Image: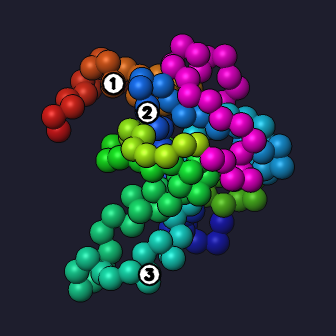
Amino acid sequence: MQNNELHRIVASAIIVKDGKFLITKRSPSKKMFPSLWTVPGGGIEVDDYINTPKSNSDCWYFALEKSLQREVKEEAGVEIGRINYLLDLAFIKPDGTPVITLSFYCNWKLGEVKLNEESVDYAWVSFEEAKNYEFCPGLLGELEMVDKILKGESINNITYNPNL
């Protein structure tokens, strides 16, 4: 790692529709986690904001959200509603790149699933059904957290309040 402050920033979307989660199966040609199940998402790019008007004289607001909306549309062909923060995680890619992933959950808004070349299959599954799939590390736990949040149950001693 050349610079301790530089990270790849990635966002993922746990998309909920009619009580089920959209999951996608990664292509076998992917370098990381080939053929495992995941959720749509990807890295933020400077192009997600640089050519748009600034929110104020100094910066762009909601750059990560816009990036996540773009990634979901590219990877799964659907639009999402308001996104809610779930958690963050960090890992080091095999090439030594440090990655910060921000995991969000949101409702499906519009569109039929149409996958790009990054994925080979998809399914809408309940949390119980998700237990039958082989996921990227940690993702089944994230689905469980969202399942509990949607049921109004506590996660990590925090009870979800849908009015917030």
Instruction: Report, in whole angstroms, how far the alpha carbon at label 3 lies from the one at label 1.
Output: 35 Å
Dot in front, 3 or 2:
2
CA gap, disc 3 and disc 2: 30 Å
Residue corresponding to mark 2:
16
Q: What residue range appears in magenta?
A: 114-135
Kind of residue at badge 3 = Ile
Q: Which mark, residue 150?
A: 1
Under circle 3, the secondary element is: loop
According to the image, what is the colour scheme of the structure? rainbow
Q: Is residue 43 left or right of residue 27?
A: left
The disc label shown at residue 48, or none? none
- Which structural element holds mark 1? helix
Labels 2 and 1 touching (C-beta < 8 A): yes
Residue type pointed to by label 1: Leu
User: Residue 75 in the image: x percent, y percent?
Assistant: 61, 52
Q: Earlier in the sequence, mark 3 or mark 2?
A: 2
